[in-house]
Image (spheres, rainbow, N blue to C red):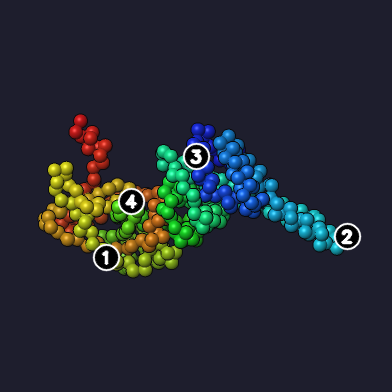
Amino acid sequence: MPLIEVDVELSVKALEKLLDYTVDFLVEPLLGGWKARREVRATLIRALGEAQAEQILAVGKAIAEAKAQEIRARAEAPPGAALRLETVDLDRRTERNLERRLGNIAAIVDKARAALPAGDVPDVEPDVAWTSSFSSGAQGVSLEEMQELWARVLAGEVARKGTTSVKALSVLRELDQGTAELFRRLCSMAITRTGDDSLVVDSFVLSPGGDPGMNALEKFGVSFVDLSVLNEHGLIFSSYKIGDDYTTSIAAQTPQGWQASQPFFYQGQEWVLIPERDPDQKFTVTGVLLSKAGREIANAIELETVPEYDQALKSYFTTHGLRMELVQSKSDAESDEL
């Protein structure tokens, strides 16, 4: 069975850019040098483009490092020593290990291909520190669920350089599947605001039932112990009652409908707050705040539905004289006019 299934109509430019972010890892342990990087990069493109993904593993068998180890061992061995077989075994183990790591990288690249947004990818040079950090972490990711997460991080960085920092990659590298699932649950309850550059500026998880530090979020699947784990991994701040002004998310009535200067996102949709009592109302939220690294990783998280929290969040705003209102997209507005 092929290692990965590949769409033969895949844009070569998009694939080249994905490989730009991982090829240094693939090549440096093998042959080294600029010419070698270009040759292996071309080999990988041909392999994926022709849906012959097994050829990626064949590249690993060209490893020069293991061969050099065998040559050195032979030269240093005393006459008659039975070192040759041991060295050959080491060579084979090294090849198998590299094949496994190459297989992980190949799977992540293919999943990232599927996660890339439609259209051309930006033709910008990848950051060397970023590609090195990503590849060294991704090579050890064998669980499919975690590969999906790493793939979305890669796709996001290819689509927009600077989406995920090297610091965030180091945090991601330390995540096990259980912690990643826990973080997914928390992100699925977060309200998020973006700046003019569309990058996330803050991401809060409000606690409708009381203080998160007193286990108020446990009924929604995130206990105080869970928060401590996420904090230890650098995904959230240690204080669970951080506040911020959300007055800019309160909408005003305009000829075009309810509009706010800074809407927020919840469950992947854009919302505003409608004042039910005081049109000049001020409003501050408090809750669990995601760290910068947490916000960056959250961009790659596939959200799950949390119906019980949906209702609790809307009720929370209602008690403060506010109503959550979904922002109508331009396409929906145009459809209504027709």
State yes or no: discs 3 and 4 in contact (Cβ < 8 Å).
no
- Look at discs 3 and 4 and give the one toward the viewer: 3
The disc label shown at residue 115, or none: none
Q: Quadrant of residue 237?
A: bottom left
- Residue 178 pos. (x, y %): 46, 57
Q: Residue at x 41, y 42 (%)?
A: 117
**Nearer the N terminus, badge 2 or badge 1?**
2
Task: Tell whether 214 sits left or right of 178.
Answer: left
In the picture of the structure, the residue carrying the numbered disc 4 is 198
Mark 1 surroundings within 10 Å by alpha-carbon count, few (fewer than 14), some (14 through 19), many (20 or more)? some
Mark 2 surroundings within 10 Å by alpha-carbon count, few (fewer than 14), some (14 through 19), many (20 or more)? few
Q: Is residue 200 visible?
A: yes
Mark 2 belongs to which amino acid? Gly
In the picture of the structure, the residue carrying the numbered disc 2 is 80
- Look at discs 2 and 3 and give the one toward the viewer: 3
**Nearer the N terminus, badge 4 or badge 2?**
2
Q: Does dot 3 land on a helix, a strand or a loop?
A: helix
State yes or no: discs 4 and 2 in contact (Cβ < 8 Å).
no
State yes or no: discs 3 and 1 in contact (Cβ < 8 Å).
no
In the picture of the structure, the residue carrying the numbered disc 1 is 243
Q: Residue at x 23, y 45 (%)?
A: 327
